[in-house]
Image: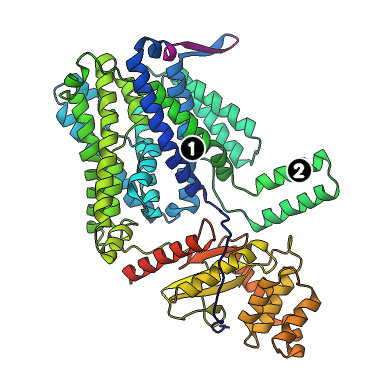
């Protein structure tokens, strides 16, 4: 049942409510932390060159943690590198799992190309390093030239790339997670000391206990903290770098959208607490609210800021210090270690990432292609040449003395040059004509579809041109205040863009909005008489007046046949609303308002500027794909 075009729209919104996804929060956090990380790196360089003795004395201070006759003894730098960095890799694992479960990579075919591109970038960079260091003992340090720094690369991408497609960040995230996985395997095998098989087996037992706990739905976080710590200590004793356990633990935390049943249960628990505010009910309500959100999201919200603003900068402060005096720079610029790292990262990484992506696209005859345009692939490939965290970690294992200083210099120089190269690629892309630029950045790949039930003009209410290239679907609740606040933005959007069709679908949240169900049925009853959009506007304009008397008054004001209106509202309208609710469940929608742009779920703010940007991007992609 299709509604006709509504009248003209006016009004703007002052609402800038932000509903970020974990990926967007992650990117904003990493972007902001890039400055902090850079500051920590400069502070380390300044500190070591002003007073190297002080710098070394602080980070070589011994710290022991003992329990009876057992314990771990390391200097402060080792605690940072093997202890705190385990939490950094835990965050990387969380984000990878999130993308795998509900993000860009939930379509498994999307994993293949960035995965292969990540491997290609590593292999090419390592091959260049080995070629330059052939015949030298420094060839054994090839692992320094393989891994991209996730935090630094994504932060630099936002700084130098401008408004690059969000899909590029997801593409790069997959590639750099491959980097991290392989790099950790290299650390655990190639650069491991003498392996203690018993301790390694104990680490496996503790990790297995974590897996079993998750299977049994054990929700006590302290259990996993204790098991993770035990696995970490076991890896320290085994001779394997214990940062491996961080990534392994992060990959176990599943991600899923909040389910409607979980949200309704949380509402019931809160109501019980509201009626009887006891400490026991407060505890149950708190656990109910937490249970409605997936473990992945809860952990990301807590650990991302700590990782980005504390752990990684502290790592930089402990490891980036290079004493530059005594003719060191003159020797380093001709050192095969420094040259191998710089050329491997700045040339090998973008060449490997872009070349493998292109080769796979050609060999698959377009069945596998990047989710973005080729300029974005090349610019993103260039930024993968920023190898900081894991590179310095491997350098501290593989080298000592002068060799270690040369390796650190190579890593830092490569990061600067890679960021500059990425900036040049995106700057040159901005000079292209608009359509060519859009194609270079967005590509022709089709968008993933999150909307389970496609728009059907025979049953959906549609506002705007039927053949518009962009379709905006909203799941809404007439009593939801956020839907009311978003409505002016939608009206302005339709007024500003003449090539957008807008679809309203019902999702009355009856557990918190007792009048929403009847309001939805009334709108459908009005639609049966060709007045859906008029009733839609009245209901959202008068959200505080949705009593039965008010609803009848709106029907009378619209000149509806009241007897038929009453019959429809309590008849077929219920089935139509139920169909919308079912489609919302299939699409993973549990709250309102939820928007879909050309079938793709919209995350972020619902203000006019944000929605307009999403519509423009969808329109550009639809034109290119078409």
Please rate how many residues cluster around mark 1, counting C-alpha atoms within 10 Å: few if below 14, some from 14 to 19, many from 20.
many
Can you give x and y, in whole percent of width and height, for residue 80 in the image? 45, 22
526 is higher (above) or lower (below) than 43: below
Residue 188 visible at all:
no
Q: Which one is earlier in the sequence, the residue at label 2 or at label 1?
A: 1
Query: On the image, numbered disc 2 is attached to which residue?
Result: 284
Magenta run includes residue 60: yes
Q: What residue range appears in magenta?
A: 58-68
Q: Which of these two is toward me, 382 or 143?
A: 382
Q: Is residue 329 above or below residue 568?
A: above
> Closer to the camera, 125 or 433?
433
Residue 190: image location, x then y, percent: 31, 25
- Residues 140 and 300: in front is 300
* Circles 2 and 1 in contact, beta carbons < 8 Å: no
- Residue 487 visible within the image: yes
How many callouts does the rendering have? Answer: 2
Residue 91's mark? Answer: 1
Q: Which part of the image, by quadrant, shows the N terminus?
A: bottom right
């Amino acid at each position: 049942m299709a509604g006709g075009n509504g009248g003209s729209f006016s009004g703007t919104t002052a609402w800038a409510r932000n509903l970020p996804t974990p990926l967007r929060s992650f990117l904003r956090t990493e972007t902001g932390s890039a400055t902090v990380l850079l500051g920590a790196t400069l502070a380390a360089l300044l500190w070591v060159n002003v007073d190297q003795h002080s710098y070394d004395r602080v980070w070589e201070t011994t710290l022991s943690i003992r329990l009876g006759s057992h314990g771990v003894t390391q200097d402060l730098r080792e605690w940072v590198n093997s202890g705190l960095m385990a939490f950094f890799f835990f965050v990387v694992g969380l984000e990878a799992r999130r993308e795998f479960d509900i993000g860009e990579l939930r379509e498994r075919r999307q994993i293949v190309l960035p995965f292969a591109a990540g491997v290609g970038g590593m292999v090419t960079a390592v091959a260049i390093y080995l070629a330059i260091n052939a015949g030298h003992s420094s060839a054994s340090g090839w692992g320094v030239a393989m891994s991209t720094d996730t935090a630094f690369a994504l932060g630099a991408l936002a700084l130098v790339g401008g408004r690059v497609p969000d899909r590029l960040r997801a593409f790069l995230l997959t590639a750099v997670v491959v980097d991290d996985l392989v790099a950790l395997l290299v650390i655990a095998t190639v650069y491991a000391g003498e392996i203690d098989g018993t301790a390694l087996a104990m680490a496996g037992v503790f990790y297995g206990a974590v897996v079993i706990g998750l299977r049994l739905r054990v929700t006590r976080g302290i259990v996993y903290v204790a098991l993770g710590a035990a696995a970490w200590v076991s890896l320290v004793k085994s001779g394997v770098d214990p940062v491996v356990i961080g990534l392994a633990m992060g990959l176990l935390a599943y991600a899923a959208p909040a389910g409607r049943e979980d949200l309704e249960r949380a509402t019931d628990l809160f109501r019980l607490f509201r009626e009887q505010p006891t400490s026991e009910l407060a505890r149950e309500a708190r656990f109910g609210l937490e249970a409605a959100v997936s473990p992945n999201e809860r952990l990301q919200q807590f650990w991302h800021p700590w990782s980005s603003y504390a752990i990684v900068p502290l790592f930089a402060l402990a490891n980036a210090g290079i004493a530059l005096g005594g003719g060191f720079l003159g020797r380093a610029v001709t050192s095969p270690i420094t040259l191998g790292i710089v050329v491997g990262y700045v040339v090998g990484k973008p060449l490997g990432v872009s070349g493998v992506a292109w080769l796979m696209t050609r060999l698959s005859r377009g069945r596998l292609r990047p989710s973005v345009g080729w300029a974005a692939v090349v610019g993103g490939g260039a930024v993968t040449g920023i190898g900081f965290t894991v590179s310095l970690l491997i350098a501290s294992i593989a080298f000592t003395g002068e060799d270690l200083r040369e390796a650190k210099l190579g890593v830092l120089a490569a990061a600067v040059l890679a960021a500059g190269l990425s900036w040049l690629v995106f700057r040159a892309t901005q000079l292209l004509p608009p359509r060519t630029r859009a194609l270079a950045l967005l590509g022709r790949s089709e968008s993933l579809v999150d909307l389970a039930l496609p728009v059907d003009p025979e049953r959906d209410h549609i506002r705007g041109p039927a053949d518009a290239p962009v379709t905006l679907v909203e799941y809404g609740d007439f009593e939801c205040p956020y839907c009311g606040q978003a409505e002016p933005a939608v009206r302005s959007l339709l007024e500003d863009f003449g090539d957008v069709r807008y679809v309203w679908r019902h999702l009355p949240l009856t557990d918190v909005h007792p009048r929403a169900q009847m309001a939805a049925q009334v709108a459908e009853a009005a639609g049966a008489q060709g007045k859906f959009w008029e009733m839609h506007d009245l209901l959202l304009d008068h959200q505080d007046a949705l009593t039965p008397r008010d609803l009848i008054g709106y029907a009378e004001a619209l000149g509806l046949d009241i007897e038929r209106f009453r019959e429809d509202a309590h008849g077929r309208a219920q089935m139509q609303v139920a169909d919308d609710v079912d489609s919302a469940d299939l699409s993973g929608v549990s709250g309102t308002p939820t928007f879909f742009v050309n079938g793709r779920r919209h995350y972020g703010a619902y203000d006019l500027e944000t929605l307009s940007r999403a519509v423009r991007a969808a329109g550009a992609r639809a034109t290119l794909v078409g």
